[in-house]
Image (cartoon, grey):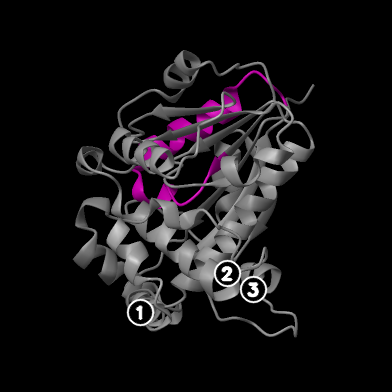
Amino acid sequence: MTNKGVEKKPSETALIAALRRYLAYKEYSNEKFGPDYLANIFLPSHFRFFLKIKKIRLNTKNKLDKFIPGGKEYMIARTAYFDGHFVDALKNNVPQIVLLGAGYDSRAYRFTELNQGTQIFELDAAPTQDRKKKCLKKAWLTVPQHIKLVPINFNEDTLGDVLEEAGYKNREKTLFIWEGVTYYLDAKSVDAVLEFVSHSAHSENTIAFDYTVSISEENIQDHYGVKEFAQTMKDHHGDEELTFSIDDDEIVSFLDNKNLTMIDHMNNEEIESSYLLNEKGLLLGPITGHFRFVFASKTQSRR
């Protein structure tokens, strides 16, 4: 999923993401803030045992919040954002959805009743994917025929070749979801994925992804939680280091250089106001300040 070292073992950050989604589900248990009722099946058995205790869940949440301020809020918003694109694609009978770096994503299973024939490809590093298969089997969840789990190393494999071998049809309309991945890749790997989307045969292909903006050491204190986030990744996830970012306000030109057109973009404040207001209109809390969402499509050729 990320650098070469991560290919040797299941992703730790994917596991933390599943833990975050589980804690949100237990805290809120609603579709807006805690929809992932399957997140717990991907946690180690001792996690599941101890997290049944409310006090331990609270202590775990507080510890995670200390390591990455705004991480809880960002995960809630991120889940909702990509859930929305996934559900829209199913409701509109988009023939294919490709999850790039799927991790322990549960959308294909949570929303299976909405699927009227969409083929879903879940791509990720083999160790993470192998563990995911074991977790699904242990939870008595059968992987339906319309879901294909496809191993890939984004820094070494060619996306087109991997997808073609898995049965991907280049001429069919596709939504690509790239959640929680870009910041762990090198620039060459990011370019390769975006160029594959922009050069695919169908004219209406789209991609939704998140990314981080570039922040200098001098300005890092101006962005909530970013200093702690960077230090936590360095101290505890050294083999999943952060390597890619986009300069703030450069997303349009960045996409344009990849022959992609921005449909929608959200900065941290827009993410908060769109996904983190409770029923009283109060903000759950700020997200870690360098995250952004973007939804883009192939640039239509001009005649």
Question: Looking at the image, do the residues carrying marks 1 and 2 touch, with CB atoms under 8 Å apart?
Answer: no
Q: Check disc 1 and report the residue beneath it.
A: 56
Q: Quadrant of the C terminus?
A: top right
Residue 145: which disc?
none
Q: Position of residue 227 (x, y in %)?
A: 34, 75
* Mark 2: secondary structure: helix
Q: Which residues are magenta?
A: 177-203
Q: Nearer the viewer, mark 1 or mark 2?
A: 1
Q: CA distance from mark 1 to mark 2?
A: 30 Å
Q: Which residue is rendered at x = 36% and y = 74% of the image? A: 64
Q: Amino acid at mark 1?
A: Ile
Q: Amino acid at mark 2?
A: Asn
Q: Position of residue 91 (x, y in %)?
A: 78, 39
Magenta run includes residue 190: yes
Sequence-wise first label, 2 or 3: 2
* Mark 3: secondary structure: loop
In screen coordinates, is 147 left or right of 60? Answer: right
Q: Check disc 2 and report the residue beneath it.
A: 268
Sequence-wise first label, 1 or 2: 1
**Residue in the foreground of this view, choosing between 96 and 272:** 96
Residue 135 lies in quadrant = top left
Q: Amino acid at mark 3?
A: Leu
